[in-house]
Image (cartoon, rainbow, N blue to C red):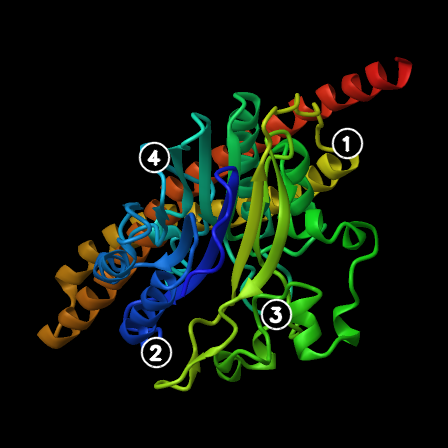
Amino acid sequence: MYPEKRGEMDLRVFSFNCWGLRFVSKYRTERLKEIGKKLADSDYDIVLLQEVWSIHDFNEIRSQVSGNLVYSRFFHSAAMGAGLAMLSRFPIIESAMCKYPLNGRPQAFWRGDWYVGKGVATASLQHPSGKTISLFNTHLHAPYGKGPDTYLCHRLSQAWFISKLLRAAVQRGHIVVAAGDFNIQPLSVPHEIITSYGLVQDAWLTVHPEQATHPPNRYAMSDQELVDIAGATCDSRLNSWRETISSKDMDDFVAKRLDYVFHSPSTSTATQSKVVFTDRIPQLDCSYSDHFGIEMDLKILEQPVVPAETRVRHTIIDDTLGITYQYMARERLHMRLRIAELLISIPIIIGVHVAIVWCDPAWLKVIILFFTVVIAVAAAVNGFCIGLLFGRWEFNGLLEFAAELKEQKLLCKEYYIDHSSS
């Protein structure tokens, strides 16, 4: 049953990480079908989904919601797909998939991030009022495991990348909505980069402004309070899939808010934001996903205001540059070691091929040839492909990221000098 009808200038947005990994996610097909059924019985105007890796799963959801969400887009990227999808009540007039310059490492093949080509799925919608809605759907790189977060630099660069897209859309006067699994916590450095340079607000903090200055103490809350008050969408004990996660796999085992909806305050205001899809699928006795969904009600302003020309604080830029330079030093060392392996392997392989002529018996030649092939393959993959090609690719991406941050640091100083003197 549909809730009461809203006004033309009201939007209801929904974002959900569906955990639709093929061959990995349990009850994937059944769960995504149930997600489609529940969406069909909702009154969402815009639905943004993450981790929908199979187009067949997407088509199943699309067929179930087509009565209300007429327009849709499934995004493709890299070898395994982007995992991003959009469904809308309003016409999609253009769309694109913008891949992140930095997105994990190919040698971490069990993570999969590099192979799926994560990025930002973008679309422009034509609202009945004549205004343009700019949608951004994304899934940032996860920290993975305990100990030092070796992917933090990549996630920071991704936050910077999407913030540039958001800023451009806001400055064009569009109604901006950005949502997804950002894998960041509220008020963290990536969060501030997005909200300050992207000229957007976190919908949850718009509705709960007190949490911007006094964040809730997650460690003193009950499981239900973590969801209702702190907006936790991941690692909740109320989620049936939490049981599959071991405390050995992460430093912070308390439920946290990783899924967000951001909006442009110059063209809209968030009137409601809550965690949804917290119930379980009766016939499967499990949660819809390993995340909960996030829902936001948005009121479009009749008369947009000029967006505040905010910039990233210089302290945030300094912290980000420090993390970037530290990571660059680590990756430069790894790159050089891999290239050294390649260079050392070349004379070894040549020498073995020369020496094998004098080897007897024949079975010894076979063994030597086998180990030579192993050395050659390791040198080609680890030394040439990962060390030389990917190493330079990643390092140049880091150099560009650092150069853009340094530019912003100079502009940031000029900005605050101008505003302090006025």
Is tag 3's residue or tag 4's residue first in the polypeptide sequence? Answer: 4
| Residue 332 screen position, x and y as percent | 54, 43
Residue 326 is tagged as none
Residue 222 location in percent, x, y? Answer: 72, 79
Residue shown at 74%/69% (left/top)? 218
Cα–Cα span, label 2 and label 4: 31 Å
Residue ID at (66%, 56%): 185
Query: Alpha carbon of mark 2 to alpha carbon of mark 1: how far?
Result: 45 Å
Which of discs 3 and 2 lies nearer the camera? The answer is 2
Q: Position of residue 290 (x, y in %)?
A: 47, 72
The residue at which mark 1 appears reads as 314
Which of disc 4 and disc 2 is earlier in sequence? 2
Q: Residue pushed farthest right?
A: 421
N-terminal of the pair, mark 4 or mark 1, is: 4
Q: Earlier in the sequence, mark 3 or mark 1?
A: 3
Find the distance from the CA under tag 3 to the CA under tag 2.
Answer: 24 Å
Q: Amino acid at mark 1?
A: His
